Amino acid sequence: MKRVTLLIVCFLLVLSAYVFNPTEIPAGEIHGNVEIGQNPNTQQIFSIVNISYDFDLWIFDNSIYSGIEVWSLPADEINPVSPFLDTYKIGYTISYKIFYINIYHWCSHPVYHNQSSIVWRETIKLDQEATTIAVGIRW
């Protein structure tokens, strides 16, 4: 919970720049991607949707991003697909030249749909989460 609170505080700090200096509201760009695929070994199907808002604020490049990944069992005679796992992510990156700080949270949750949760509960840890803070260099 403390890590999620830290994410929220960082996000609010960036947004507070608008309150203190409303003439410098940054124009940004929205980026995203959609991906669908299959694990050839298990025939599991996945779909991914990501979106980010990238903007400059003073001398810093900022990116707020989020996404969802859904794993499903292949179709059978009753269901077109049977989802069994959702993974959510949210993060914030602030950069200056080649240096950056990234705050990232992800969590996965089981989807109870017919027999899919029973079949995969033994082989995959379905209910997990992590929050990370990283410092890096881009080149």
Image (cartoon, rainbow, N blue to C red):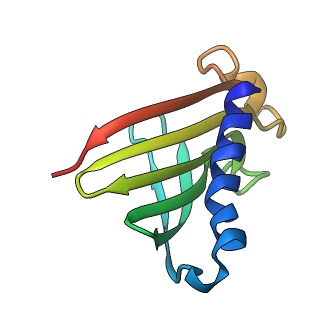
Query: Residue, x 79% and y 31% (percent of image)?
Result: 115
Q: Which of 88 and 9 is in front in this view?
A: 9
Query: Residue, x 59% and y 30% (percent of image)?
Result: 131
- Residue 39: percent from left, percent from top: 43, 42
- Residue 27: percent from left, percent from top: 52, 83
Q: In which quarter of the image is residue 129?
A: top right
96 relative to 3 in the view: left or right: left
Q: Which of 14 and 67 is in front in this view?
A: 14
Report the residue that reaches farthest toward the top.
Answer: 122
- Residue 81: percent from left, percent from top: 69, 52
Q: Does residue 121 lie above or below 48 as drawn?
A: above
Q: Quadrant of the N terminus?
A: top right
Q: In which quarter of the image is residue 123?
A: top right
- Residue 79: percent from left, percent from top: 76, 53
Q: Does residue 107 lie above or below 88 as drawn?
A: above
Q: Does residue 78 lie above or below 27 as drawn?
A: above
* Total residue callouts: 0
Report the residue that reaches farthest toward the left.
Answer: 139
Query: Residue, x 70% and y 44% (percent of image)?
Result: 9
Query: Residue, x 45% and y 43% (percent of image)?
Result: 102
46 relative to 81 in the view: left or right: left
Report the residue that reaches farthest toward the front.
Answer: 20
25 relative to 37 in the view: left or right: right
Q: Nearer the viewer, residue 40 or 63?
A: 63
Q: Nearer the viewer, residue 48 or 42?
A: 48
